């Protein structure tokens, strides 16, 4: 079945070149990377080469890069391990973080008695820096700030440099969820005062189940998953070699033609927004920031019997869009982000783009909307 795929913030199509790079490690090179014979050593070598590649692409030392099973695991590791191994008792975050962060924080507050504060947002749904500074300046505890670089639903971007400077002023640790930005923006950890960051390959045409955890060499974090000594004792478990190769290859490919892809996707997003405003300007509310994540466009339609089933009806026409985050296993729960920023009854639609989309697809999408909302 042919379809139009506008849910690239949920996941992206695996690139053929990435798959090709992964194949030998799914088939002939099946040895355990920890084995001392050459069938194993070839895999160890491939992992370490991938680590070096990723480190050089992200402006980090190879020793600061750890491979995990997903972005969720990376964020869980940071949040749980700062409590376990760095005696952190206070975490400052925001109410519109991804569930990988929010639900972990709820668990830490309940089970470990960790104080969690949620920083206020400005009218444009950005972090209120005055409130963040107020929270940092009045705490007497070991504190971690965890704020996402780009919101996956509305695309607001965080000034990571500014948060980094502020956290260092107050001697706080800083974790940022970069799942929507690694592979989509040039990032150099050498230039940022970030202690921890999470990334995920499937957001930039890499394999699913392949995560990245950046840990600054200034910090000594303990592991969350305990077992063998893989990932220099930071993440036990036999490495998913093919997915690690896939992470590095996908990042290399994304960053190699970043400017070209960014320009193309920005144009698509702006074309789609203009078309939506042309036809529905009087009824929709634009939830995404104009200067936000260039892959994501989020608008709300007023709630009625037609918009209630809009996502499903678009699916019947072969158009994949999302109502919010893809991480609720298809459960029909309202988006916590939209509910927070705009609690009136409305139906959010997130259209998220990749280099594989076209203007013609947007035209088809607009025609479908006209038919369904007529
Ligand atoms: C901002 C953000 N953080 C974390 C995640 C979770 O990443 P993963 O699917 O690799 O666990 C996602 C995935 O949607 C995301 O968009």
Image (tube, rainbow, N blue to C red):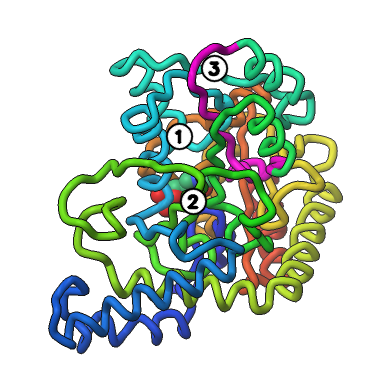
Quarter of image, res 123: top right
Q: Is mark 1 within 8 Å of ligand 1?
A: yes
Q: In the image, 251: left or right of 358?
A: left
CA gap between label 3 and label 2 equals: 27 Å
Mark sitting on residue 101: 1
Query: Does dot 1 land on a helix, a strand or a loop?
Result: helix
Write down the residue under mark 3: 117
CA gap between label 3 and label 1 equals: 13 Å
Query: In the rendered structure, which segment of residues is drawn in magenta?
Result: 139-160
Instruction: Determine if residue 157 is in view.
Output: no
Q: In the image, 84: left or right of 65?
A: left
Quarter of image, res 40: bottom left
Write down the residue under mark 2: 217
Q: Is residue 22 above or below residue 109?
A: below
> How crowded is the residue under tag 3: few (<14 C-alpha within 10 Å), some, or many (20+)?
some
Looking at the image, tell me whether mark 3 or mark 1 is earlier in sequence order: 1
Q: Quadrant of the N terminus?
A: bottom left
Task: Spot the residue most to the front.
Answer: 218
Q: Is residue 121 above or below residue 152?
A: above
Q: In the image, 125: left or right of 194?
A: right
Q: Position of residue 118 (x, y in %)?
A: 57, 20
Quarter of image, res 307: top right
Looking at the image, tell me whether mark 1 or mark 2 is earlier in sequence order: 1
Q: In the image, 199: left or right of 171?
A: left
């Amino acid at each position: 079945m042919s379809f139009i795929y506008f849910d690239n913030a949920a996941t992206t199509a695996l690139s053929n070149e990435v798959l090709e790079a992964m194949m030998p490690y799914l088939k002939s090179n099946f040895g355990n990377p920890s084995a001392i014979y050459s069938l194993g050593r070839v895999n160890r070598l491939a992992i370490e080469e991938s680590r070096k590649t990723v480190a050089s692409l992200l402006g980090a030392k190879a020793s600061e890069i750890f491979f995990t099973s997903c972005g969720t695991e990376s964020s869980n590791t940071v949040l749980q391990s700062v409590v376990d191994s760095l005696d952190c008792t206070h975490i400052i975050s925001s109410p519109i973080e991804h569930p990988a962060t929010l639900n972990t924080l709820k668990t830490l507050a309940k089970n470990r008695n960790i104080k969690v504060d949620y920083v206020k947002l400005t009218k444009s749904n950005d972090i209120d820096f005055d409130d963040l500074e107020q929270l940092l300046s009045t705490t007497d505890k070991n504190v971690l700030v965890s704020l996402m670089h780009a919101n996956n639903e509305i695309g607001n971007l965080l000034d990571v440099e500014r948060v980094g400077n502020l956290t260092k002023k107050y001697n706080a640790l800083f974790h940022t969820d970069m799942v929507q930005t690694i592979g989509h923006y040039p990032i150099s950890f050498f230039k940022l005062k970030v202690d921890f960051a999470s990334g995920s390959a499937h957001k930039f045409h890499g394999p699913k189940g392949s995560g990245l955890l950046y840990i600054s060499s200034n910090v000594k974090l303990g592991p969350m998953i305990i077992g063998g000594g893989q990932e220099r004792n930071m993440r036990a478990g036999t490495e998913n070699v093919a997915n690690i190769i896939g992470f590095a290859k996908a990042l290399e490919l994304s960053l190699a033609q970043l400017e070209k892809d960014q320009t193309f996707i920005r144009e698509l997003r702006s074309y789609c927004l203009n078309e939506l405003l042309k036809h529905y300007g009087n009824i929709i509310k634009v939830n995404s920031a104009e200067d936000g994540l260039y892959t994501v466009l989020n608008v709300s339609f007023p709630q009625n019997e037609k918009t209630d089933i809009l996502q499903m009806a678009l699916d019947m026409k072969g158009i994949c869009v999302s109502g919010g985050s893809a991480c609720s296993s298809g459960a029909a729960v309202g988006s916590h982000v939209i509910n927070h920023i705009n609690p009136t009854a409305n139906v959010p639609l997130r259209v998220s783009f990749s280099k594989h989309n076209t203007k013609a697809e947007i035209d088809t999408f607009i025609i479908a909307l006209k038919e369904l909302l007529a």
